Each structure stands twice: as structure tokens, then as C-alpha cells.
Amino acid sequence: MATITHNYHDTGYKELFSYPEFIQQLIEGFVPADIAQLMRFSTLKNHSGNYITPLFEEKFEDVVWSVEITWQGITQEVYLYILLEFQSSVDRTMPIRLMHYVACFYDHLLKNGTTTPSKGLPPILPIVLYNGSERWTARQDIYDMVYPEPPAFLQVYQPHLRYYLVDEGRYTDEELVLRQTPLSGVFSIEKASTDRKGLQQAVDRIVAIIQAEPDKDRMDKIITRWLKRHLQRLGAEVNLDQLNSLVEDKDMLAENLENWAQQERQAGRQEGRQEGRQEGEQLGIQKTARNLLKLGVLSNEQIAEATGLTVDEVAKLRVEDKH
């Protein structure tokens, strides 16, 4: 099963991962191939649930999936625990958080009768999907947070829980292009969000991917809903009400994105001119203060009152002029 949460804002990923195609694309495209090859994606089943994690006093909504794997001739159900980590910075407590989440999830399985202590707990593959601007540097196993390393006789008693990391920002554009799936297109758009030209190129790429999909109309609707959420979060000056189909409305969207880029460039130029004026005014005030200092008859307080500078700023100018 896969458990998916989102942090602090709706990224639209919750809906994406409520479809089996995107679970499959995540596993096949971004998890080691030897793991993905064991899974029979035709057995993916969606479940839902809400779990309360007392330690962190947070409630997170889950999208839960079950999938079968075959290993050494034995078929069994395996749980994937996929945590969407969309905070702006790296959370170095992730190993502790994840151990707590997995423990709560196991507790849920016991309480709802999915398993019993005598039957045993099913295996879980924890995955953290992260899209922050900083590269992920947190430890990936809680054992590695135990420092200094415990003596040999204690090591066997220390907790172990390792998660597999999917750090979107680590993938280059070239690497994402090699994965011709809607999810890789979503990652490309996320990466290009601060680059208006790159954003348009990423949109063009995902449109091409959608058009090659067997059920392109359905995929078009899913990705269009996600993109509208994404552009809204970016504060895009785009008429989202008219965006109903990414494929059919791509020209209209391209025009809107170009207009948005032009507005930002114009706003940047105006901000630059304003900063230039302010800098010029400041230099003029400093020149006036220096001229008053040269007279040698006014105190710092008097010059500050005449120019609008602070007494400390006038004192600094006096020291600079002496040197």
C-alpha cells in the first residue's frame, strides 16, 4: 500500500496520486528498477483513511494503495509508504517523523483487523517525495542519527528505518526527458516554475506526452486540473477559468504565459528604476551631509536633523571623510 500526505498547501499531488497510473509512473520511473520489476501494477487497489499521529499533533489525509509483488516464487502484498514533503526547507527530523508515521500505520492495520500480531506485520517500503528548492541533506536512516556511533554490543538494539528519497530537484532536464511520462512532465514544470521560458517549454513537453497517451482525454483532464492549481499557487497572471484542456487550449495558455512574463519583466524594470531613484536620492543626501561636515560648525545631530539621516549615519560619514 502507499500512504501519501501533503504539507501546508494543496499542491495538487494528492489528486495525481489518487490515480494508479501515477503510482506506477513514480515507482517505474524514480525507484530502483529491481524493486519496480517485482510489482504487478494491475493489482493496485486504492483505499482511503485518516490517521492521527499524536507525537506530532497533526492529522494527515492519506491515499492508500495495495499492490502485490512476487519474490522468489512467493506472491504477497507489500506496503509502500510515500510521504509528500513539500516544505520549503529540509526537515532533518524526517527519520524520526517517518518512524512514527510507519508505527502509527502499523497500529492502524492491527486495529482494523488487516493483520494480527500472530500473523505478523507486512513489509513496508518508505518513500519520501520532496520538491523543495534546497537539495535534501537529512539522514535517510534513523540509525545514522544515533551519534556518536554506539559500541558494538549496543548496535543491535538501535532502531533502523531507511526511506528511499525522490528529490525532484536532483533530476536534470535531460534525465526527466528520458522518462516520457506525465509525472516526469509534472516534475519538469515544478522545476521550471521560476523560469518563464523554461515553464513554457515544460508545458509543451507535457502536452506532447499527453497526446501520446492511450487515454489522452482522461490524462488531459487530470493534468489540466493539476496545472491550474500549480499556476494559481505561483500567482500567475493567467485566465485559469478559460483553461479547460491543456491540449486544446495550449495556444491560449502560451499567450497567457508570455503576457505574464512580459508583465513581470516590466514590473522588474519599474522596480529597478525605483531602486535607482532611491539610490540617487540617498547619494544626494549624503553629498549634502558631507558639504555640511566640511563647514566644521555643525554637530552630527544638527546635520542629521537637516538631512534626514540618522546621527549614526552622519558619524560614519564624518569618519569616512577623515580617512
Image (cartoon, helix red, strand yellow):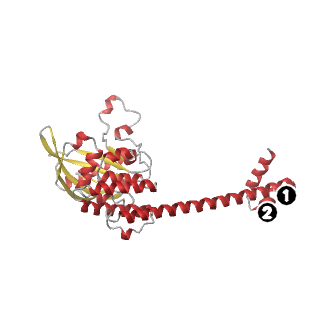
Quadrant of res 33 = top left
Seen from the viewer's position, the closer of residues 64 and 107 is: 64
Q: Residue furthest front?
A: 251
Q: Residues within 10 Å of mark 2 (few under 14, many from 20)?
A: few
Question: Circle 2 — which element?
Answer: helix
x, y (%) of residue 234?
44, 61
In the depicted view, which residue is nearer to us: 214 or 154? Answer: 214
Q: Nearer the viewer, residue 12 or 185?
A: 185
At 75% from the left and 56% from the top, the residue drawn is 286
Q: Is residue 303 left or right of residue 37?
A: right
Check the picture and name the quadrant holding the C terminus: top right
Residue on which the image places disc 1: 298
The answer to whether mark 1 and mark 2 are in CB contact below 8 A is yes
Say if residue 34 shows up in the picture.
Answer: yes
Real-space CA distance between mark 1 and mark 2, rounded to the nearest whole angstrom: 10 Å
Residue drawn at point x = 38 percent, y = 54 percent? 202
Q: Secondary structure at mark 1?
A: loop
Count all numbered tags in the image, as a single digit: 2
Residue that carries the numbered disc 2 in the rendered image: 306
Residue 279 to residue 30: above or below: below
Q: Residues within 10 Å of mark 1 (few under 14, many from 20)?
A: few
Could you say where residue 84 lies in the image, as x and y percent from the top left? 34, 53
Q: Residue at x 39, y 51 (%)?
A: 131
Horizontal relation, residue 131 to residue 42: left or right: right
Residue with the most extreme left position = 73
> In the figure, is residue 238 to the left or right of 164?
right
Q: Label 2 is placed on what type of residue? A: Ala
Identify the amino acid type marked 1: Leu
Label located before the other in sequence (1 or 2): 1
